[in-house]
Image (cartoon, rainbow, N blue to C red):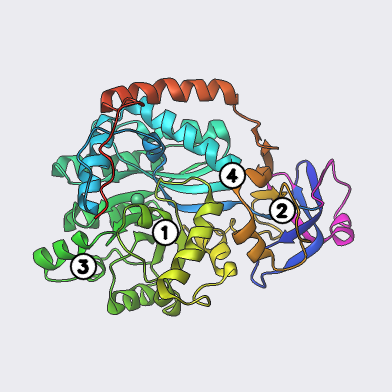
């Protein structure tokens, strides 16, 4: 190991290692892009004299959060006043909100939305994410522009283009090709590629097989939306005579390489199949609530040994809010306060998310791993940081409490300021491009929308 040594000292170190070790008044030594030592301050100091010291007193030191499923371009919908007939189910949300948006996107929009979302992720303590982009009229080259935004902010992004045969087989082939082109590209910086397929109700068996083949050839993760709404289940039963997960198994998609987003409408047999095939799941509780699709059977998944990670599905980019929502949703849904622990939720946003994408060097603070680290200092410390760190993180922290964000040992944000990107300039650039996108979408900020009718 070589490179500049940074000592983070005197914090409550939440390692997320195999023993889930927590060290009070702990320290982490970073050397170059790796973690060199973790433990008590004196033990870590034995590793050598640091070039730089970061004080973490009254702070939590933990691995950077990993968002296991996102759509960076979803940030363009924030506050949009879309002049549309209000959707009444999930399919209509896709047809009236998401698909009209993605049809308007060009490569500048890919870049601007990614830049905005990456800045929010970084400032709120997310150091890595898995993104799926969709733009039927801007496929080729889109991933290069998203990678440009990722590297500008300095965050780590697994990025992909969502292949779909929503309109034609050719569209599916071109989407898959964009993923393969990016996977073959050299010098991608902190942007990593993967294969992405939209959902089983918009793709044929042939496209699934081609996606699986490409993922194996390039040793890349493979992601797909699964039974987010009930329409996916109906489609597969009607067309193939089987449920969604059964069809994906029969066509060869399920494996340790696959990350299935959502999995809300699964039966017990499908959950058992996921456990048996070691297939990963990305759970998106806030998005599921927003789209009113239902509650994922998380307790059954965990009981069947399914590795479930946590995503935001392009909705709220503060992963602390997503952790808290996950924690609360399943309690109220089952009316059981013991149904999920705060520790499990933190695992889903760190070590389990890293495992889902085969990122063995991320997700925990351990010697030899990549130094993707965040420091959190609550603005008001009402209670000592000596109780349950997981309860503190899930119930008492928000993204704005993050003071330091390291990726590959490089400090990319400090005291809520990004260090690699000129924030004001980037903000202006984003607003200019997304403002023009809004004009094309027919959204004007002051336009009245139909008020919500209570039934
Ligand atoms: Zn999604």
Mark 3, mark 1: which one is toward the viewer?
1
Residue lying at 66% horizontally and 44% vertically, measured from the top left? 406
Question: For the residue labelled by badge 4, is the local secondary structure a helix, a strand or a loop?
Answer: loop
| N-terminal-most mark, 4 or 2 | 2
Give the number of the disc on residue 124.
4
Question: Does the magenta run of residues contain 38?
Answer: yes
Give the number of the disc on residue 247.
3
Mark 4, mark 2: which one is toward the viewer?
4
Find residue 231 and report its horizontal and vertical position in percent.
Answer: 19, 60
Question: For the residue labelled by badge 3, is the local secondary structure a helix, a strand or a loop?
Answer: helix
Question: For the residue labelled by badge 2, is the local secondary structure a helix, a strand or a loop?
Answer: strand
Q: Left of 86 or right of it: where is 264?
A: right
Question: Is label 2 in contact with label 3 (beta carbons under 8 Å)?
Answer: no
Marks 4 and 2 sit apart, C-alpha to C-alpha, by 21 Å
The magenta span reads 31-57
The residue pinned by badge 2 equals: 35
Mark 2, mark 3: which one is toward the viewer?
3
Residue 95 quadrant: top left
Q: Which residue lies furthest to the left in this view?
A: 238
Q: Out of 415 and 309, give the one closest to the viewer.
A: 415
The residue pinned by badge 1 equals: 285
Question: Is label 4 in contact with label 1 (beta carbons under 8 Å)?
Answer: no
């Amino acid at each position: 190991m070589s490179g500049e040594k940074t000592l983070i000292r005197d914090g409550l170190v939440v390692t997320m290692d195999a023993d889930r070790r927590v060290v009070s008044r702990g320290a982490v030594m970073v050397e170059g892009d790796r973690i060199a030592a973790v433990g008590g301050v004196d033990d870590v100091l034995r590793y050598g004299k640091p070039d730089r010291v970061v004080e973490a007193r009254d702070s939590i030191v933990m691995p950077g959060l990993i968002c296991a499923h996102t759509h960076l371009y979803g940030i363009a919908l924030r506050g949009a006043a879309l002049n549309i007939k209000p959707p009444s189910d999930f399919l209509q949300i896709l047809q009236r909100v998401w698909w009209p948006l993605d049809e308007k996107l060009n490569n500048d929009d890919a870049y601007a939305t990614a830049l905005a979302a990456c800045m929010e992720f970084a400032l709120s303590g997310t150091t890595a994410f898995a993104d799926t982009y969709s733009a039927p009229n801007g496929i080729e080259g889109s991933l290069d522009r998203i990678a440009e935004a990722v590297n500008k902010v300095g965050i780590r992004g697994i990025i992909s283009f969502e292949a779909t045969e929503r309109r034609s087989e050719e569209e599916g082939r071109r989407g898959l090709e964009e993923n393969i082109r990016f996977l073959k590209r050299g010098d991608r910086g902190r942007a990593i590629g993967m294969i992405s397929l939209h959902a089983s109700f918009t793709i044929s068996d042939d496209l699934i097989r081609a996606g699986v083949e490409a993922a194996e050839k390039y040793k890349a993760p493979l992601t797909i939306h699964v039974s987010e709404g009930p329409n996916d289940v109906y489609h597969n039963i009607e067309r193939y005579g089987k449920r969604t997960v059964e069809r994906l198994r029969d066509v060869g998609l399920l494996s340790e390489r696959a990350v299935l987003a959502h999995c809300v409408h699964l039966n017990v047999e499908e959950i058992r199949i996921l456990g048996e095939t070691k297939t990963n799941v990305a759970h998106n509780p806030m998005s599921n609530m927003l789209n009113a699709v239902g509650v994922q059977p998380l307790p059954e998944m965990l009981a069947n040994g399914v590795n479930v990670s946590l995503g935001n599905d392009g909705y709220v980019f503060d992963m602390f809010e997503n952790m808290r929502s996950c924690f609360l949703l399943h309690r109220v849904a089952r009316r059981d306060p013991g149904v999920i622990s705060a520790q499990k939720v933190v695992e889903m946003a760190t070590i389990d998310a890293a495992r889902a994408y085969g990122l063995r060097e991320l997700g925990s603070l351990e010697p030899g791993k990549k130094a993707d680290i965040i420091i959190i200092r609550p603005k008001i410390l009402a209670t000592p940081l000596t109780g349950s760190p997981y309860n503190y993180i899930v119930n008492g922290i928000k993204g704005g409490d993050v003071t330091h964000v390291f990726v590959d040992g490089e400090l990319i944000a400090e005291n809520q300021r990004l260090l690699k990107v000129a924030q004001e300039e980037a903000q202006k650039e984003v607003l200019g491009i997304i403002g023009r996108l809004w004009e094309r979408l027919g959204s004007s900020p002051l336009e009245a929308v139909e008020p919500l009718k209570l039934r």
